[in-house]
Image: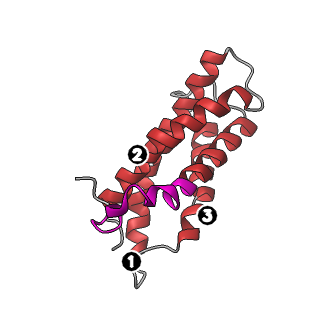
Amino acid sequence: MVPTLIGRIQTRLFLLATVGVVITVLIVPVLPGLSGPLSQDYRVGFLVLAAVAVLGVVWELVYHFLMQFRWEKDWPTLFGLVTLVPEGLLLFFLLRSGAIGSLIDPVPPAAAFWTQFVVVWICVWLVANGPMRVPFVRWRFRGGRVL
C-alpha cells in the first residue's frame, strides 16, 4: 500500500527530527564558509533544517496533488531522491531573497547551505528506503500512518 499523505508528512518530519538532527550535529563544524562561533553555526544549521521541514510539508501537498495524475498514485523511488533539486533551489532562493532570510540570520554561504542540504537529504533518503523498512514493517501496510 502506498503511504497516505499524512503518513508521508509524518515520515518526513520523523526522519528530519532523527536522522537530520544527527547529521546536522556531525556536519556543522566542518561546513565550508561558516566563520562564526560554533554556537551560531549550529543555530543557523538547525534553522535551515527547520526550514526544510516546514517547506517539506508544503512540498508534500504539491507532490500529493501531482501524484493524482499518475496511475499508481506514487512516485518511483528515484524521484524521492531527485526532488532534492526543486526543494533545495526553492529554499536557497527564499534564503537569498530575504523571504525567510530574516528568520535565519546570518544566511549561510552557498557552499555551507548546499553541503548540509545535500548530505542531510541523501542520508534521510537512504534511511527511508533502507533501514527504516526493517523496524517499521507495518509502515508500508498501514498507509504510512503512525497512529
Q: Is residue 136 visible?
A: yes
Which label number is shown at residue 82?
Answer: 3
Which label number is shown at residue 14?
Answer: 2
As for residue 141 lying within the magenta part, the answer is yes
First reached walking from the N terminus: tag 1 or tag 3 = 1
Helix, strand or loop at label 1? It is loop
Res 45 quadrant in image:
top right
Amino acid type, label 3: Val
The image shows residue 81, relative to residue 109, as above or below, that is below
Amino acid type, label 1: Lys
Residue at the (49%, 39%) spot, across then down: 51
Q: CA distance from mark 2 to mark 1?
A: 23 Å
Give the labeled residue for mark 1.
73
As for residue 23 lying within the magenta part, the answer is no
Per the rendered image, the range of residues in magenta is 125-143
Helix, strand or loop at label 3? It is helix
The image shows residue 142, relative to residue 92, as above or below, that is below
Percent x, y of residue 29: 69, 26
Residue 57 falls left or right of residue 96? left
Q: CA distance from mark 3 to mark 2?
A: 20 Å
Outermost residue on the front side: it is 134
